[in-house]
Each structure stands twice: as structure tokens, then as C-alpha cells.
Image (cartoon, helix red, strand yellow):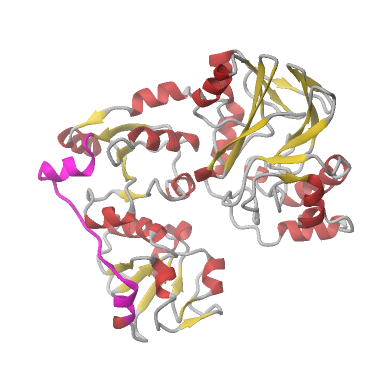
Amino acid sequence: MKVEQIYTGCLAHAAYYIENNGEAAIFDPLREVQPYIDRANKDNAKIKYVFETHFHADFVSGHLDLKAKTGAQIVFGPTAKPGYDAIVAEDGQVFEVGNYKVKVLHTPGHTMESTTYLLIDENDKEHGIITGDTLFIGDVGRPDLAQHVIADLTEEKLARHLFHSLRNKIMPLSDDLIVYPNHGAGSACGKMMSKETTDTLGNQKKTNYALRADMTEEEFVKELLTGLTTPPGYFPKNVLMNIQGYESLDNVMEKAKTPLSPEEFEMTANATRALVLDTRNPEDFAKGFIPNSINIGLDGSFAMWIGEMIKDINQEILLVTYAGKEEEAMIRLSRVGYDNTIGYLKGGFEAWKAAGKEIDTTARISAQEFANKYNKDTLVVDVRKKSEFDSEHVVDAVNIPLNSIYSNLSEIPKDKSFVLHCAGGYRSMIASSILKQLGYDNFVDVEGGFKEIASTDIPKTDYVCPTTLL
């Protein structure tokens, strides 16, 4: 049986494509659907079904646009209540795609409608399972997301559902089945996913902590809930878009693809509440940027940090990108529900500079320069995650994780110089741009972050010091 995994690294997301005898199906598609349509056209196949494993939190699915463009039927598992026309399947229901079969296995736990799809080939042999966020490679889906949409669905309730789903629906299946999850390492939908994106179910039974045969329900709940971090703030908003429906990506892109001259860009920024989002890399941003713009680079975990740092999903956005990267930035914003891009700077930052417009910069130093100037009175602000900080950090550094910077501004002085860093420079430049926007001009950012600092003789410690926040 041919199953094609279509993996998107920036979201650590996997969609799946199957085709047989002129009929095709897509599982958990991303927002931009033309690549799936092109794939089916290559096989001279008609997309018959769009299977959704659950209402996704970390991205807006492309199921509605696929239905509109191809006539495919949308399929959800039991208990789903979409706000549009879709098939809500019964547990055990079988769908045919050519001579292939897709069997519905209701596996609540990550969410209540979460469903695993058992793939059966043309010879009636069970081939694999498309597990969504029920089972990952090395992990299982976190059970604490649904309560942000429905308060009664507590993480403990869902964890117990997941325990029984895994034991009663997944683990009795054959060891030779291939596991096809919705995410890999880097996704916020689990806590310890492998970099591998497929495996056999038999190997997962041996290696995945959540599938331990002798594990009790209480042990499962405790282990699953230990170490969960706060999910990104945009997750509940994406869930609601996937439940209720959303505007066609074609319409979103038509509005966003508005080229603006430097003069028009400046006028639009002044006349609206739009956020100026600069998606260039940190090195170029530091050397010059439009005052009050925020830097979140396309080459990093763009979608996640957009969702973390831009709290209003309806925020109007004006884009500054490298030439030729405008459309990519617009699509990647819309993948996580940010559909209000209202234009972009034609010619990018170079056009702005050539027009003689005002620019700003932010200071950076090398790790060695930091080491040369460091003394016991140096204030160091580390914006890495707490777990990274706990592993090793500069002695007496203050830990303010990037996603909590707005709520901890009182800990960042405006009357004393400080040094800012993250792991490699990407997150600290996001922080730098935010602080510059808020009027801070008394800090320097360390190029290369802690990766470079670690090689210097600056005193470091592997325990949490008393000044650590959060």
C-alpha cells in the first residue's frame, strides 16, 4: 500500500495522501491546498475524502478549501460537531478509496473526537494507522488542550480516556503496522516526540513510555501530565476556526498581496492599528529596521512564535520580507489563523532605506566581547525556556522566557544596562525588537546566544539561582 507523508518542518506537521484506482484521500491537510490537488492530478485521481483526525489546535486545516475546490467529503470521527457540512463517522465505520479501505477507530484522549484511521490495502491486509495526535513516535498527545475550549474537559479526564484508547484500540493491533502520526519533534502538541516521523507499532510498544504493558492507569496519568508546559496562546483560537469554519485562503491572500511603496506603507501604518512584522533574519534586522517593527524570522519557528507573541489573532499586519518571500510569509501566517495581512513593503527594507525613511538599529556583541566585559555586577537576561535555563546558565542571570516577556516587564530595568541572550540568537532578537518598541535602549544582544557563551570563561551554573523567574 502506498502512503505518502507530506511533511512540513516549520510546523513539524505531517499530512498524508493515499490513492488507488483513480480515487484519493488526504488526511489532516494544511491551509494551502493546491499541492494536494496537484498531487492527485499527477495520478489522474479525484480526491474523494478529506479525513480529519481531530479539530487541530496548532494549525488551521485545509479541509474546507479542499471540499470547495474538489467536492471531496470531509470526515470526522465520532462526537465531532463541526459547524459545516461533514460526515461524522461511527466507530468502526469503513470508507473505500479505490480498492483501499479506511476504518474509523475512535480514540478519544487528546480531544474527545480524536480518531485513528486504520489503513487496509487492496488485499484486505492491515497496513498502518494514521494516528493524528493520539500516538506519536516516542510520545502521545497532550490531554490539556481541550479544556481551553471546553472547561469541563479537564486534562485528567482526557488522560484517562487516552489510557483506555491506547490499550483498547491501538495496542491490540498487529506489531507490523506502520504508525503515521500528525507531528514530529518540535511540535507543541506533545512533550518528547522523536525526530523520526514513522515507526512500526511493535517498536513503539517496546520504546514508547506511554505504551508500557505493565503501566497502570494512575501511573499513565501521572507520567503524561508531568512536565507539560503551557500551550501557545493561539491554540484555542485555531481549534475554534477548525470547528466553526474560516475564510477561503484565496480571499485572504488576495487582500494580503497588496504591494505598498515606502510612502504608502508609512501612511498605512500610521492610519491603522497594523503591526509591522519584519520576517528577515536576526543579523539583518539588527543592522537596520523600521522603527516599532517586530522581528520574527521566517527561518526559525515562525508560526509558533507568531502565535506566542501576537496575542490578537485578528491583528492587522504589514509585512517586511526579503524579495520573493512575501507570499511564503502570508501563507505561513494563515496556517496558524493570522488572516489579516493588509499589505507588504514593495522592495523590502532596502526600498525603505533608499527612500530616506527613518530607521532604527539594535546593538549586538559577540560572546567573547561579552566575556571580556563581564563582571559580577553585569545584569544578564536569559529568554530561553525554563528547562533550558535549568540545564545550564550564566551565574546570577535572570530567566524571563520569551513567551512571558510582556508579563515580566517590571523585572527588566530601563535605568540599568543589561545583556540579553537566548540559545542561538533567534528568540533574543524577537525580544530585542519588542523591547525597542517599548522604549528600551539600554541593552545589547549576544550573537550566537548561549551556544557561543558556553565556550567562554564566563561563570556558569547548572542549578537554578534565586533570581530566576517563573
Evaluate whether residue 470 shows in this view.
Answer: no
Residue at x-position 71% and y-position 52%: 139
Q: Where on the picture, by quarter, is residue 379?
A: bottom left
Residue 167 placement, left or right of 290: right
Residue 380, percent from left and from top: 38, 75
- Residue 436 x %, y %: 28, 58
On screen, residue 188 versus residue 164, left or right, reads left
Pick the quarter of the image with the N terminus: top right
- Image quadrant assignment for residue 177: top right
Count the labels in the image.
0
- Quadrant position of residue 78: top right
> Against 72, is 399 above or below?
below
Name the residue: 42% across, 65% down.
422
Q: In the image, is residue 424 part of the stretch drawn in magenta?
A: no
Query: Is residue 409 placed above or below 315 in the rendered structure?
Result: below
Q: Residue furthest bottom?
A: 376
Q: Residue at x 58, y 49 (%)?
A: 187
Judged from this view, the residue extending furthest toward the left is 356
Q: Residue at x 64, y 34 (%)?
A: 55
Q: Is residue 423 visible?
A: yes
Q: Position of residue 164 (x, y in %)?
A: 85, 45
Give the answer, above or below, for where 120 lies relative to 367. Answer: above
Q: Which contiguous range is marked in magenta?
A: 346-371
Foreground residue among 14 and 198: 198
Nearest the eye: 216 or 266: 216
* Spot occupied by residue 32 in the image (x, y as percentages of width and height): 49, 28
Left of 6 or right of it: where is 383? left
Asked whether 391 or 98 is in front, the reply is: 98
Q: Nearer the viewer, residue 363 or 398?
A: 363
